[in-house]
Image: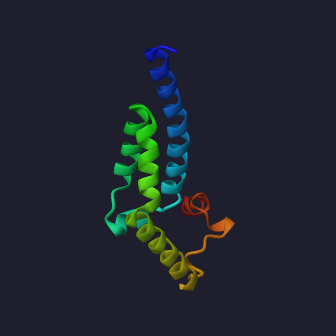
Amino acid sequence: MSVASSVGVLLGLGYLVGLVAALWCGRDLRRIPTRVWFSSGFDERAWYWGLGIWWVLGGWGALVLALVWRRSDARVALHEEMIDSRALRRLRPVSPDLVRSPDRSRRAMFRRQA
């Protein structure tokens, strides 16, 4: 086997493994709501850009970045904050005025005014 074919196999395998890692990590990143990212101060886009760039550069870096994300303190803090925000929303009573019934849609409101 020549050196060029070995590099090609290594690169192809890296793209395949990196794609799986990038998809898993991207799914995990998307599970965290934007409001949690915003309130925590972590930058969501940096993780997405890192995944994309490392995958384009051969794939193996995306695997490393996915493993770093899996073990990071940022992930733990964001998941804890996400769980806390969901618990707070469940405890907060919802005003009947905020719940939109089918006949109180925006179109129906504009039709009544016209």
Query: Can you give x and y, in whole percent of width and height, for residue 84 in the image?
Result: 49, 78
State the residue in front, 55 or 1. 1
Query: Can you give x and y, in whole percent of width and height, for residue 93 in the image?
Result: 56, 85
> Is residue 86 left or right of 7 when viewed as pictured?
right
Res. 60 in view: yes
What residue is rendered at 61% in x and 70% in y? 100
Query: Can you give x and y, in whole percent of width and height, for residue 20 in the image?
Result: 56, 42
Give the answer, above or below, for where 110 lies relative to 48. below
Residue projecting furthest to the right: 102
What residue is rendered at 39% in x and 38% in y? 54
State the residue in front, 86 or 15. 15
Total marks shown come to: 0
| Location of residue 114 (image quadrant) | bottom right
> Is residue 61 left or right of 32 when viewed as pictured?
left
> Is residue 40 left or right of 75 when viewed as pictured?
left
Residue projecting furthest to the left: 41
State the residue in front, 60 or 92. 60
What residue is rendered at 46% in x and 53% in y? 67
Res. 93 in view: no
Query: Can you give x and y, in whole percent of width and height, for residue 80 in the image?
Result: 47, 74
Residue projecting furthest to the front: 1
| Location of residue 55 (image quadrant) | top left
What residue is rendered at 43% in x and 64% in y? 75
State the residue in front, 33 or 100. 33
- Type of colouring: rainbow
